[in-house]
Image (cartoon, rainbow, N blue to C red):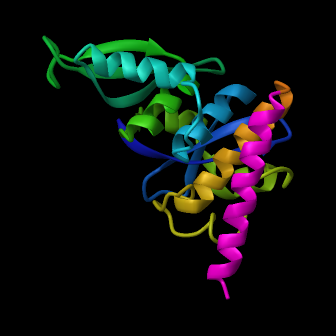
Amino acid sequence: MVEVEIWTIARTEEGNAVILRPIGSNVSVPIFIGQFEAQSILIGYGDVVIPRPLTHDLLLETIHRTGMDLVRVEVHDLRDTTFYAKLILTGKEYSEVMPLELDARPSDAFALAVRRRCPVFMAKKVIDEAGVPVEAIIDKATGKGRHRWDSERNGTPGKKPISGIDARRDALLAELEGAVVAEEYERAAEIRDILLQMDREFKSNDK
């Protein structure tokens, strides 16, 4: 197993993709996911406070309340074009030596991992089979939407590009998009006001 980082979430011509990157490597592994899963990952990564828990928030709280802990996520196999992941849990009768392993979709596993801030690992055979140069992923990005493929995000290998205020803004934009689709206009207005305040503070601090 090789530790990987969730480098970013990209919009490509094929759809939304989580881009995983082995730490210190210029190879990346794209895993395509649905819009709602992408939104949930961004919300979790950006620590966005939402009025009601999403499914992944509820599951993580359930794990915690039952005395268990999510210690890591593993992407362990690739069959045809389907990636297989599992959650590694400890607590009660389960330990690091003999953990509880639960089968999970990679998108759900990543949404839980970013909330728990636990590491993500990938089997070397999966990286060897599905890995592509980072530059190839960048070339496929459409450039549309909220994701910026600039020098900051394409910088030092091993550096998490989704961080700090950038992560929070990306997550808020994702939630805003979801609120509009769901016609939750009151929540959309609240998010819009938060984004406007963030932009004002950024401009003020930049002077």
Q: Position of residue 18 (x, y in %)?
A: 63, 39
State which region is magenta. Answer: 184-207
Q: Position of residue 73 (x, y in %)?
A: 39, 29
Name the side, left or right, on which 164 lies relative to 195.
Answer: left
Residue at 52% of width from left, 31% of height from top? Answer: 111
Q: Position of residue 15 (x, y in %)?
A: 80, 34
Instruction: Name the chief secondary structure element in magenta.
Output: helix
Q: Quadrant of the C terminus?
A: bottom right
Examine the image and state in which quarter residue 165 appears: bottom right
The answer to whether 135 is drawn above or below residue 176 in the figure is: below
Q: Is residue 148 visible in this depiction of the protein? A: no
Q: Is residue 16 visible in this depiction of the protein? A: yes
Residue at 69% of width from left, 53% of height from top? Answer: 194
Within the magenta stretch, is there residue 204? yes
The answer to whether 93 is drawn above or below residue 5 in the figure is: above
51 or 148: which is nearer to us? 51
73 or 163: which is nearer to us? 163
Examine the image and state in which quarter residue 149 appears: bottom right
Residue at 86% of width from left, 40% of height from top? Answer: 13
Q: Position of residue 82 (x, y in %)?
A: 62, 19
66 or 74: which is nearer to us? 66
Examine the image and state in which quarter residue 167 appears: bottom right
Name the side, left or right, on which 49 lies relative to 81.
Answer: left
